[in-house]
Image (tube, helix red, strand yellow):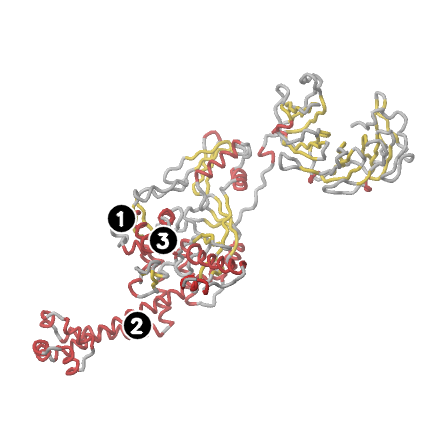
């Protein structure tokens, strides 16, 4: 065994695979959380954004300078600071420049940086960029030792661990990201409102979240829109750091001639792509899922203008929009999740007050560090000035020492009691400056610096003075970017959640009488009006199975032999021309099943469903409505059984008859109410099967067809019994079909 192999063997440690994997996965998760996905609560930036801005600053791309190619910026970022792919860095840069994605853009882009339709930006070799004033405010203080710097990934450069952040970027621009096991989603807010909250919190550190929300009304999205959420819900979300808020499009009614009108959408919800929104609405329109809408057009230019045409002028604009809000992305939920990294890089869900406090604490530390940095510079300069004053008062001797001594520095330090810094400054001074040196100038500068030194020392020592300074800085930010500026004016309108506008079915579908015809082979059609069907034509070998007089607004339910219910709206049935169309084209009836009953759905009524073996139960009509083509299974059946009837519950008693021509009558209350199942035995058979059932009131008697008329049997005592018995022969004159008739 070689020495190298032995060394490797000695370094091998035994560990359980699960423990090793857990340890390494945890390390990966933490690196993803800290280094990629979650923003820092202090500056609101992720590492890629922080490195982008710093690289642009190093390239001197300030707001008053010229633009530089984005490719140059991206090259510097991935070469010096962020060792990732250029596309991910460029995508991050593009987002910082999009005024529809970022409330206060940090990058001033020149060229095609995408649009609200979802079109991507041009390649980075074609676009140019520079910093905005907001970005400059974020980085103000980097040269003053305001924050710590770390080595870059290759150890050749330094980069800030956090920005000084004079601008409250986290709340102003928001953030979103998905990490391992956690995510963040913070909406943008108005800087003016944030500033007011910060100013109040400085004076009242014990203020609660509710007080903060007196100033911060809610999100302020770059795309505007309407925040339609109760105030209590908004406060609750910001108090907990989590919650959902409804954001809807802004619209207005535009009057046309002849009493017509159209809806103009001028603002859409945040992060909704306009082109996708229009395409999805158009698709729903083609699928006839938006019955109140006739057409949609995009007439947008630099501003959003989406035109919505109502189906009819009788449709109220509010009804149309509520219908669209419910079914399209004209209204979306913004899910608030204020999960951020605190100053110790620990993920934490914060409420709005904690975020504001973290920002103020950071700014206080920045102020202390900048003040201390300036104080150190002043002390250094005062030390030099004091040396200059000694040199001025002994100018001839100083010149003599410099001219004659081999080690003038040491001689001057010994003779005039100078420090090393003072002696070095005198020796580095040009003769011209030495000649022009004046005592008054030295003393005036020294006095000025002494005064500033005292002020800085007081500032560092006094929290009250620092709070006053912070308040002034926040007021400057408010003046520069607040609501009185074009950039800072609030865009998102806040309104109480609207009362839900119920859109009646009559408004969505024109109510017209129809007669639904179903053939024996499963062809269905809808004739206009309530008309007789005596002269209807059918395909060869086909004939009439059943008819139903109803309306286009009614739901029609179909019960099949496999125990399923299916639902069709009256207006969706093919017209009466020709033979109609197969029912199986509209609902997915299996090949081995057939329709038993076709009924108009009556809400809040009861239906009896039963199998051929005589088992059944009562089900609410509300529970049989099927939402899909596949229908809804209600009656569970064994393989050797089929559903055979579905009857409305219209009386106190029920008469049941089998194919063995035995009939029983029992109280309807004996049949259980169920939502799904196989039911209970209604009538007991050996070889026979259930033929028919009928509900009636015992005082009215049992009616059935007899000969050419209707007979009513009023003495029911002979057949009155309990459920699940065999029964007796039906009354004289009962039809040989064993059917009670309609």
Label pair 1/2, CB-CB below 8 angstroms: no
Q: Nearer the viewer, residue 352 or 643?
A: 643
Label pair 3/1, CB-CB below 8 angstroms: no
Answer few, some or many: residues within 10 Å of disc 3's Cα (few below 14, many 20 plus, some between 14 and 19): some
Q: Secondary structure at mark 3?
A: loop
Q: Is residue 431 above or below residue 417?
A: above
Q: Nearer the viewer, residue 323 or 590?
A: 590
Residue sitting at the far front: 1
* Earlier-in-chain disc, 3 versus 1: 1
Q: Residue at x 82, y 42 (%)?
A: 670
Distance from disc 3 to disc 1, alpha carbons, whole Å, reads 24 Å
* Earlier-in-chain disc, 3 versus 2: 3
Distance from disc 1 to disc 2, alpha carbons, whole Å, reads 38 Å
Q: Nearer the viewer, residue 38 or 229?
A: 38
Distance from disc 3 to disc 2, alpha carbons, whole Å, reads 40 Å
Residue 381, x across and y down, in percent = 22, 72
Q: Secondary structure at mark 1?
A: loop
Residue 192 can be seen, yes or no: no
Residue position for label 1: 67
In the rendered view of the protein, which quadrant contains the N terminus?
bottom left
Which dot, 1 or 2, sits closer to the camera?
1
Q: Is residue 268 above or below residue 580?
A: below
Residue 291, x across and y down, in percent = 55, 33
Residue position for label 3: 83
Residue position for label 2: 456
- Name the image quarter holding residue 544: top right
- Name the image quarter holding residue 710: top right
């Amino acid at each position: 065994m070689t020495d190298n192999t032995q060394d490797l063997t000695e370094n091998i440690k035994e560990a359980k695979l699960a423990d090793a994997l857990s340890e390494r996965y945890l390390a990966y998760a933490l690196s993803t959380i800290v280094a990629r996905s979650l923003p820092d609560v202090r500056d609101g930036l992720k590492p890629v954004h922080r490195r982008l801005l710093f690289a642009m600053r190093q390239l001197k791309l300030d707001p008053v300078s010229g633009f530089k190619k984005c490719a140059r910026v991206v090259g510097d970022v991935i070469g010096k600071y962020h060792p990732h792919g250029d596309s991910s860095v460029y995508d991050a840069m593009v987002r910082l420049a999009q005024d529809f994605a970022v409330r206060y853009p940090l990058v001033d882009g020149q060229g095609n940086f995408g649009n609200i339709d979802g079109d991507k930006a041009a390649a980075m070799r074609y676009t140019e960029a520079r910093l905005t004033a907001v970005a400059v405010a974020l980085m103000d203080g980097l040269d003053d030792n305001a924050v710590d710097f770390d080595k870059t990934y290759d150890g050749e450069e330094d980069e800030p661990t956090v920005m000084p952040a004079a601008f409250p970027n986290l709340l102003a621009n928001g953030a979103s990201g998905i990490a391992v096991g956690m995510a963040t989603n913070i909406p943008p807010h108005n800087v003016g409102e944030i500033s007011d909250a910060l100013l109040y919190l400085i004076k009242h550190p014990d203020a609660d979240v509710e007080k903060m929300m007196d100033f911060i009304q809610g999100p302020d999205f770059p795309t505007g829109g309407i925040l339609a959420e109760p105030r209590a819900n908004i406060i609750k979300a910001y108090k907990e750091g989590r919650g959902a808020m409804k954001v809807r499009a802004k619209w207005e009614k535009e009057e046309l001639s002849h009493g017509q009108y159209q809806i103009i959408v001028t603002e859409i919800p945040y992060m909704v792509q306009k082109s996708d929104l229009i395409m999805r609405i158009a698709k729903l329109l083609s699928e006839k899922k938006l019955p109140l809408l006739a057409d949609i057009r995009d007439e947008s230019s630099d501003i959003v203008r989406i035109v919505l045409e109502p189906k009819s002028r009788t449709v109220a604009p509010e009804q149309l929009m509520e219908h669209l809000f419910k079914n399209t992305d004209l209204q979306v939920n913004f899910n608030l999740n204020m999960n951020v990294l605190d100053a110790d890089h620990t993920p934490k869900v914060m409420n709005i007050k904690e975020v504001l406090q973290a920002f103020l604490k950071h700014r206080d530390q920045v102020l202390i560090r900048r003040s201390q940095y300036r104080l150190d510079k002043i002390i250094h300069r005062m030390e030099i000035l004091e040396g200059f004053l000694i040199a001025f008062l002994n100018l001839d001797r100083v010149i003599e020492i410099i001219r004659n001594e081999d080690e003038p520095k040491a001689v001057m330090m010994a003779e005039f009691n100078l420090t090393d810094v003072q002696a070095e400054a005198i020796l580095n001074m040009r003769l011209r400056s030495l000649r022009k040196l004046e005592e008054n100038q030295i003393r005036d500068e020294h006095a000025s610096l002494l005064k500033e030194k005292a002020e800085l020392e007081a500032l560092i020592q006094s929290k009250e003075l620092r709070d006053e300074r912070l308040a002034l800085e926040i007021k400057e930010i408010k003046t520069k970017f607040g609501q009185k500026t074009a950039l800072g004016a609030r865009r998102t309108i806040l309104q109480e959640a609207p009362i839900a506008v119920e859109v009646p079915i009559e408004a969505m579908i024109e109510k017209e009488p129809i007669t639904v015809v179903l053939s024996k082979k499963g062809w269905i059609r809808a004739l206009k009006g309530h008309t007789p069907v005596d002269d209807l034509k059918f395909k060869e070998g086909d004939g009439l199975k059943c008819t139903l007089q109803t309306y286009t607004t009614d739901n029609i339910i179909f019960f099949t032999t496999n125990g399923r219910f299916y639902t069709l709206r009256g207006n969706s049935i093919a017209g009466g021309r020709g033979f109609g169309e197969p029912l199986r084209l509209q609902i997915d009836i299996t090949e081995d099943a057939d329709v038993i009953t076709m009924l108009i759905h009556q809400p809040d009524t009861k239906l009896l469903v039963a199998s051929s073996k005589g088992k059944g139960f009562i089900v609410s009509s509300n529970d049989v409505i099927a939402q899909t083509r596949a229908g809804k299974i209600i009656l569970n059946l064994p393989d050797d059984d089929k559903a055979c009837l579905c009857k409305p519950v219209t009386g106190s008693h029920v008469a049941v008859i089998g194919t063995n021509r035995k009939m029983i009558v029992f109280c309807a209350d004996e049949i259980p109410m169920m939502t799904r199942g196989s039911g209970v035995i209604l009538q007991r058979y050996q070889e026979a099967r259930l033929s028919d059932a009928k509900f009636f009131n015992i005082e009215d008697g049992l009616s059935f067809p007899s000969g050419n008329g209707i007979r009513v049997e009023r003495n029911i005592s002979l057949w009155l019994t309990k459920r699940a018995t065999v029964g007796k022969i039906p009354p004289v004159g009962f039809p040989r079909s064993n059917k009670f008739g309609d």
